[in-house]
Amino acid sequence: MEEKGWFKRFKDGIQTATKFKRETPEGLWFQCPKCSETSTQKDHKENFYVCPSCEHHTRIGSRQYFEIIFDGKYELFFEEIQAMDHMEWSDLKPYKKRLESAKAKTNLTEAISVAKGKVNRLPMIVAAMDFSFIGGSMGSVMGERIASAIDKALVEKVPLMIISKTGGARMMESAFSLMQMAKTSAKLSRLSAAGVPYFSFLTDPTTGGVTASFAMLGDINFSEPGALIAFAGPRVIKETIKRDLPEGFQTSEFLMEHGFLDFIVQRKDLKTRLADLLSFFDKAPVAAGMEE
């Protein structure tokens, strides 16, 4: 007589050999870094990479933002502009090796990607940073891609948005990285003179030379909730002045309260808010007013 499954397990001590145990598939679950709540990766993605429990906005990259913002299709530009080790940086890990490693790890060509698509049928150019690529650091290629995106926006009279997510200037390029602050700021002045809208979207984190230049020069400056926005980080400031900092110091909510941001937007509402802005500027006689 064949033994019942439960009886056989009982007789064998209700033990399952390790080789027969099934492991939980990798990448199936997401644990919020803020509240430790667990959800499936599928649910996390469908919720725009925002924790359903505490609404923590997880850091995402340029491709995820393009998928959220655009009406499906978009086209990438300026991918051929890539960094080189002009300084022959010879740290523990040479700059050339860091670039190769970052490209292989992220499947990106630089810390910023430029795309054009439509938001509720209205065209827009978006330059989005990737923190996963050497900390989203600003180097000469980032400056050149932003400058090229501005030129494209000028020629086509299409609004531009830059999504900042960066640790600051890329030290491996020395003064070349710092020069991008002036370069991008000067380019944006041409965009302003032509009456072409520029939206600056600051996400976590936005620090260093990016904050001190193009990130704060938008016709509209806005951010995601809880984002760190600063020049020097709070830890550095606290160690320097030897004093406790105000609660929530350098968060997007703090900057909003002190007049540095126009509004804060939940990621799920981002596309709708952008569509409203594009519609408003599309109907407003901005260009005609600037020409007079």
Image: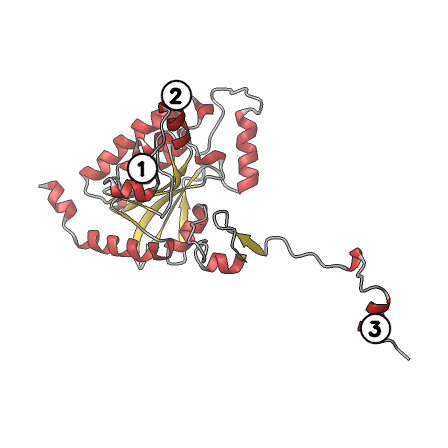
Sequence-first tag of 1 and 3: 3
Which label lies toward us, 2 or 3?
3
In the rendered structure, the answer to whether residue 189 lies left or right of residue 77 reads left
Q: Residue furthest right?
A: 1
Q: Label 2 sits on what residue type?
A: Ala
Please tell me whether residue 100 is drawn above or below residue 41 in the rendered image.
above
In the rendered structure, the answer to whether residue 260 lies left or right of residue 13 reads left
Which structural element holds mark 3?
A: helix
Q: Nearer the viewer, residue 40 or 177?
A: 40
Please tell me whether residue 163 is drawn above or below residue 45 in the rendered image.
above
Q: Residue at x 83, y 76 (%)?
A: 4
Residue placed under numbered mark 3 in the picture: 7
Instruction: Specify the quadrant of the image occupied by residue 182.
Output: top left
Using the numbered discs, state the Cα–Cα distance from disc 1 to disc 3 in whole angstroms: 68 Å
Which structural element holds mark 2?
A: helix
Q: Residue at x 53, y 37 (%)?
A: 103
In the rendered structure, the answer to whether residue 201 lies left or right of residue 292 reads right
Residue placed under numbered mark 1 in the picture: 215
Which quadrant is the C terminus positioned in?
top left
Residue placed under numbered mark 2 in the picture: 175
Please tell me whether residue 258 is drawn above or below residue 276 in the rendered image.
above
